[in-house]
Each structure stands twice: as structure tokens, then as C-alpha cells.
Amino acid sequence: MVDNLKRINKFLSEVGYCSRREADKLIDAGRVTINGVVPEMGTKIAPSDEVHVDGKLIENTKQKFVYLAFNKPVGIVCTTDTRVEKDNIIDFINYPKRIFPIGRLDKPSEGLILLTDDGDIVNKILRASNNHEKEYIVTVDKPISQTFIKHMSSGIYLEELEKTTKKCDVKRLDSQTFSIILTQGLNRQIRRMCDYLNYEVSSLKRVRIMNIPLDMPVGEYRELTKGEFAELNNLLAASTKTYLEKNN
């Protein structure tokens, strides 16, 4: 237990709050508390202690999670099992830290997928009942009719999954291309919906997950910006994190 103790000024420095010298000044000014008590200079804390500066809780954020947005090419499989699938997303990205995809895009599909090492955020994003939007651009093998748009928007019963798709926003972009915004993540959902209406998907690209847009070239990734992550957290604030569903 003694080995886990560290000086308060070192703690404030390690978590990135301020330098040790500045921490000493804050302690001397009585602006720091440990478990509600103003400490003496040189006081040591345990991992379970709560440190506040000016009444604000200071947490150890030194161990930062990774949040990546990746433009998955066609042919790459969203699996972490690198032994089974040679064209897997993990080997393709070759990130220096262990990460995993949030949900999936099937092998013939391309576009935006998020990857992280933060397990808590995964189910919050994926669970259908949280109603988080995912937007796709889809091209099919023949001209799109108004009946097609109506059925896709209204919900389709998928017999093989024994589920009816939720109502969604579908817009015709040109004669054979449409956009669709889902808040559901049934397996191969868009392809199954199109197949039910006797259309075959020629190409499928995910262009947005919640507030995160697809804005990088195919095969490249970037970190989420601070602004994107802050907005993502706001959108996830009321989300539950139980029961994981597969993405389309």
C-alpha cells in the first residue's frame, strides 16, 4: 500500500494539471484538498484519495484512450482475430496500440468506422435503443422507384432475422443512388432491405456516425478532434452501455 503513495505535487504534475512548482503554490495557497482536507506541503496520496483544486475534482487522465475514425476500404474485414482473417482491419491499420472496431462494416462495404481501446464507449454507440444515427450512401443495380423509397423508409420485416426495421430517413440522390440514415444495427441490414425489394446493392459507403463525418481518403485514419469527442460525449450522456448489436 505504501508503494502506491505519491506526493500531491507529483500527482498534479503527472495528470497534466500543472507543474510541480505550480502545484506547490496551489497547496501553499490552500486551494488544494485531499478528501476534503487542506493538506500540508509534501503530503502523499493513495490512488483512492480524491483531490480537488478550487473545488474541482482532478482525475488521472494521463492514460488517454485512443479514438480513431477510419475510412475502411472494400475487402477489409472488421475483425480483431488476425490469425483467421489475413485482410483484417487491425493488421491493415497497424496502429501501435491495441485497438478494436466499434461495430462493423461488412467486407464488400466501405466507409467510416470508429476504433478505440475504450470498452465503455462501445455499447453506448452500438445499442439500437440509444437511437444514434449512422448515414450511408448506397448505389443499387436499377432505377429507384418512389415505392422503393417509401418501403425503405417505413420499415421492412426481415424474415431471416425475425425483425422489422425501424422507420428511417431515405432520400433519392440520383436514378440509382440513395442516402439512408439508420438508428439500428441489424446484420447486413441495408443489403437485406434492398434484397427484399428485389434490388441488389452495387456499392455501400458509410459517411457518418453520429457527429463524426467521413472526411479522410480511403484506407486512411485520423484521431477524433477534441471538439468531435466533446460533442460525442454529449450525445452519449444519456446512453446505456449494455447489450451489443452488430452494425450494418
Image (cartoon, grey):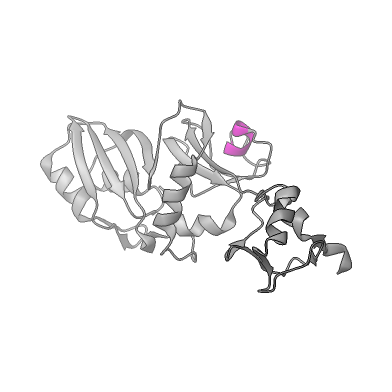
Residue name at image x 17 percent, y 29 percent: 175
Q: Which residues are magenta?
A: 88-93
Residue name at image x 59 percent, y 63 percent: 54
In this rendering, the answer to whether 215 lies above or below 46 is: above
Residue 95 lies left or right of residue 115; in this view the side is right
User: Outermost residue, right direction?
Assistant: 2
Residue 207 lies left or right of residue 41; in this view the side is left
Q: Nearer the viewer, residue 53 or 211?
A: 53
Residue 48: give x, y in percent of width and height: 72, 70
Identify the image quadrant of the N terminus: bottom right
Q: For the stretch drawn in magenta, what is the main secondary structure? A: helix
Residue 9: give x, y in percent of width and height: 76, 56
In this rendering, the answer to whether 219 lies above or below 161 is: above
Q: Nearer the viewer, residue 6 or 96?
A: 6
User: Outermost residue, bottom direction?
Assistant: 36
Residue name at image x 81 percent, y 60 percent: 6
Q: Is residue 126 visible in the rendered structure shown here?
A: no
In this rendering, the answer to whether 123 lies above or below 152 is: below
Q: Is residue 90 magenta?
A: yes
Residue 163: give x, y in percent of width and height: 32, 62
Residue 103 lies left or right of residue 177; in this view the side is right
Residue 183 lies left or right of residue 114; in this view the side is left
Residue 248: give x, y in percent of width and height: 40, 47
